[in-house]
Amino acid sequence: MRDLDMLRLERRVGLLLVPHDEGPGVAVGVARDAELLLRRQSGMASIELRQPITAQTCFRIASVSKQFTCAAILILAAEGMLSVRDPVGRYLPGLPGWAGHITLDQLMRNTAGLRDMLELLRAGGVDLSHSVPAAQIDRAIARSEGVNFPAGARFLYSNTNFWLLGQVIERVSRMALADFLQDRIFRPLGMTRTCHTPDVMTPVEGLATGYMPSGDGFVRAGHGFALGGEGGMVSGVEDLALWARALSLNLLGGGVLEPQMEVLAPFTNGTMNSYARGVEVDDWRGLKLVSHGGLWPGFKTAFMRVPARRLTVIVITNHGGLDAGAMGMAVLEAALEAEPVLHPVAALPLPSGCHVTEEGVSLDLWLDEAGRPMARQHGVAFALGPRQDGRLHALRGGFRFALEARDGGHVLHGDAGHSSRLRRVEPGPGPDLAGRFHCADLDTAWHLAGDGTWRIDGPLAKAGPFRIEGLGQDLARFHMPGRLYDPWWDVRFERDDAGEVTTLVASGARAWGFRFERV
């Protein structure tokens, strides 16, 4: 990179950081080959102590941990300790029947079909701010005999997959996951400011405090779940740059770790899954982009690599209201602005309002104050951006969402070649439906009061009342405000011949088809 290009990049990054001087902040890194080209930070690691973010500050990197879990599995496979084709039940007895045929590879690729453990607990009234030990997470997973889809058929991001992979690593290596990662990855690579923390209450030197916006200020983010292979790591810009270098130079796993992590595999219908092993592999404006994001209350991370240019962009924030992914993409575009290979893209008109797919999944579409197209599904808001195929894609990792204008309407494209035409609806009051409905997979009852509200009676918590929003005679949103965001469940009503509602079929972002039977 020429000196003037470097100056331009530094100033572009500086402009991104200006608004975050006083509150919780951001750390940004850009690396190429063995050189950390740029490292900038802004804002406070601790607002209360007026402690600024420095080059030594570390953060919870959440789901960026998943690629390290997959790397550990691949290291064990290279040593003949396991095979990625092994069923998970070979190593973890006591799981439901699905464990006998779901492979470790399907877990790594998010094609196993397992319901997300966070959704299992949320459906039972538990929010991320609650204290939930590992044993309770294990019980929730073992209780859920249902799956989202047959293994290998589709993609759906699930933290359960990587929680189980972390336990497989411990069973095979006979070491705690934290110790295995430390001995086999962190220490050899010089990642001395990186660690795995199963207990969120464990003190970590230099760890920033996570914050969530609240009114005109901020509050400390609450997070009490035990952590495993899905998101338990603490790290920083410098250490993640060392990790990117190790991948580029194939310093681990017998020299084949990077290609093994990035190799794609098709679904059972022959279409390709763009989620590899703990990382997403996309075609971005003519370049291969390998990336992953991380989200935990008060922390967000974006880790992006362009192997053809040997370029890595890292953005980490302790501000729960910022979009690290969008910031990372802005840094990436600034770093590659002079590249002639980048294809221009055209914007697609956005149909605003509330829409429903043919499968009964609801979503909101709108333009934000800056004119950016936005979408929200199951309560999670995310930005949309155009790509060279003429569609608006989600600028959010681990999520399949592409909007296409067609025949006077719009079609939503998801995973594994699945598409659905959108139908606009007008949300209204919740149904005047009263009753108690129970789901065996969750050991949880949902109570509907008949006044447009509902409450939860789960094995670990009681919650509510919450609001129900009607989307038609047999479809509604069951809202459930949480610490991280305000999610909803898309709920279909099944009726008997007399027209009485007998079953609620509830689907969240990462767990589909919970059946609540009237009792």
Image: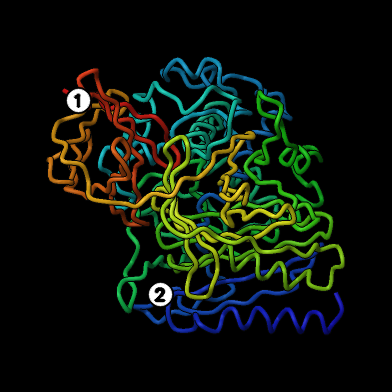
Q: How many marks?
A: 2
User: The residue under label 2 is which amino acid type?
Assistant: Ser
Q: Position of residue 317 (x, y in %)?
A: 51, 67
Q: Residue at x 52, y 27 (%)?
A: 171
The vertical placement of 52 against 56, above or below, is below
The vertical placement of 90 against 15, above or below, is above
Q: Position of residue 278 (x, y in %)?
A: 62, 42
Location of the C terminus by quadrant is top left
Could you say which quadrant of the image residue 259 lies in?
top right
Q: Residue at x 41, y 53 (%)?
A: 354
Q: Residue at x 47, y 41 (%)?
A: 357
Q: Which residue position holds label 1? A: 500
Task: Return the residue nearer the eye: 401 or 120.
Answer: 401
Location of the N terminus by quadrant is bottom right
The vertical placement of 496 against 251, above or below, is above
Task: Return the residue nearer the eye: 343 or 238.
Answer: 343
Q: Which residue position holds label 2? A: 46
